[in-house]
Image (cartoon, rainbow, N blue to C red):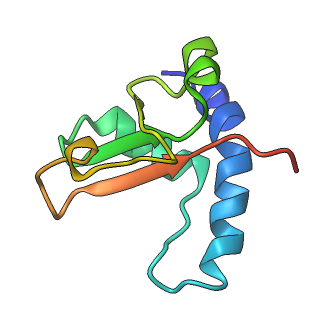
Amino acid sequence: MHRARIASLLAPALTLLALACTHSPELKSMTVDEVAARIAAHDGKTFVFDDNPQDRFQKGHVPGAHWVSGKEPTAADLPADKGALLVFYCASEL
């Protein structure tokens, strides 16, 4: 998996996540390198979710990412392991 590909897809989302973290202490930000390392580890405890519209997801997404509807997510979209690391991202017009 190429870091540049992951960076191009995650950078806008990580910026938004960092902004969100200033208002919500429950959210944690991660660098592109941290996310890439967790994905590369194949630890079975890291799950990446793409919250873009379905057509944008089909055009390109972080390798291994799962699409999830931002409007109608359900518990079934999430892993059963409550200790898993969940990484959510979406495109930004910033």
Residue at left offset 64%, top offset 22%: 56
Residue at left offset 65%, top offset 33%: 9
Q: Is residue 4 above or below residue 41?
A: above
Q: Quadrant of residue 30?
A: bottom right
Query: Most extreme residue toward the right, as rendered?
Result: 94
- 75, 63: nearer the viewer: 75
- 48, 36: nearer the viewer: 48
Quick check: 91 left or right of 77?
A: right
Residue 42 percent coordinates (x, y): 25, 34
Residue at left offset 42%, top offset 31%: 65
Residue 10 percent coordinates (x, y): 63, 42
Q: Is residue 77 above or below residue 85?
A: above
Residue 23 percent coordinates (x, y): 64, 85
Q: Quadrant of residue 14?
A: bottom right
Quick check: 92 left or right of 76?
A: right
Q: Is residue 58 above or below residue 90?
A: above
Query: Most extreme residue toward the left, as rendered?
Result: 80
Quick check: 69 left or right of 43?
A: right
Residue at left offset 25%, top offset 48%: 78
Q: Is residue 94 above or below residue 9?
A: below
Residue 91 percent coordinates (x, y): 70, 40
